[in-house]
Image: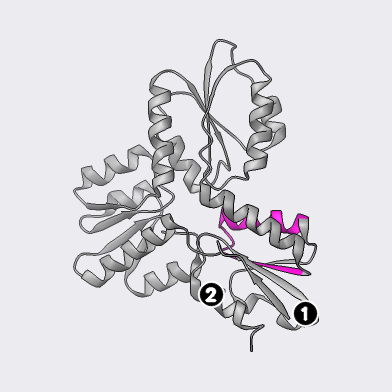
Amino acid sequence: MKVKLAKSAGFCFGVKRAVDRVYEEVEKGGSPIYTFGPIIHNEEVVDDLERKGVSVIHTEEELKQLKKGTVIIRSHGVSKHIYQVIEKQGLKMIDVTCPFVLKIHRIVERESALGKHIVIIGNDKHPEVEGIKGWSSGKTTVIESLEEAQSFQVPGNEELCVVSQTTFNNNKFQDLVEILSKKGYDILVVNTICNATEERQAEARQIAREVDAMVVIGGRHSSNTQKLYEICKKECNDTYYIQTLNDLDVQKLLSVGCVGITAGASTPKKIIEEVQKEWQK
């Protein structure tokens, strides 16, 4: 059987930087370590860190209960208010927010201060988007679907600033921006989709077109992995979404001539190699 592994599969720069930083802090020992939200969307990594003493806190209320320790800001970023709470509590803070996400925070903070209505193209419930919203000092709207873009309406004199969740599908982003642009508003569009995300999606699409079956590896809550799956499924009907090798019925694919493998930005190299080696025994 032939196996095509995407070169872009696995940890991106921002995720690797974040995960490495947490493990470095674990090695130092000392004060309790917390991450605000899971450091990345991968259960295997989060569980391993928990076994090493790293606790995940999810809310501002939990944060306010802490009297000492180190709080690590997740790669997805957080709202401006969370930084202020950490400082007020007198806790040590390590910020491993992805640089591409930090760029969006700066744009939103600046443009909202100028009075622009911020439009975020993305999933309203995703932690990255929740964090981005927390840097706007004015009106903010999140749009994910064509229907939401079509129904979007504000007074004609409002200026808009449109940004995107870093892992959003680039083609869909362009479609939504086109709908908004036709409404006649004064719009500043900043395409903040990460270059690595675009490259990963393009490579996955190409491989899916060339193989008999496609395997997409990543956490169930990983937005970029979900989008990879959607892209691959459109090109290859036999596309499988797994978190680890245990989720894959290998026997089902033994008769396949060529299988493709890609993985989300939060998928460790070890998990990808385990899947790949199944067809190289």
Which is more toward the observer, 64 or 204? 204
Residue 273 in view in this figure: yes
Q: Residue at the far top: name it.
A: 157
Label 2: which residue? 271
Q: In this rendering, is residue 40 above or below 135?
A: below
Residue 237, image x, y percentages = 80, 62
Identify the residue at image location x=60%, y=58%.
225
Which is more toward the observer, 201 or 167? 201
Q: In this rendering, is residue 59 above or below 43?
A: above
Residue 31, image x, y percentages = 20, 64
Q: Amino acid at mark 2?
A: Ile
Classify residue 212 as left or right of residue 187.
Answer: right
Classify residue 32 as left or right of residue 267.
Answer: left
- Quick one: SS at disc 1? helix
Identify the residue at image location x=52%, y=59%.
265
In the image, is residue 230 part of the stretch drawn in magenta?
yes
Q: In this rendering, is residue 135 above or below 181?
A: below
Label 1: which residue? 252
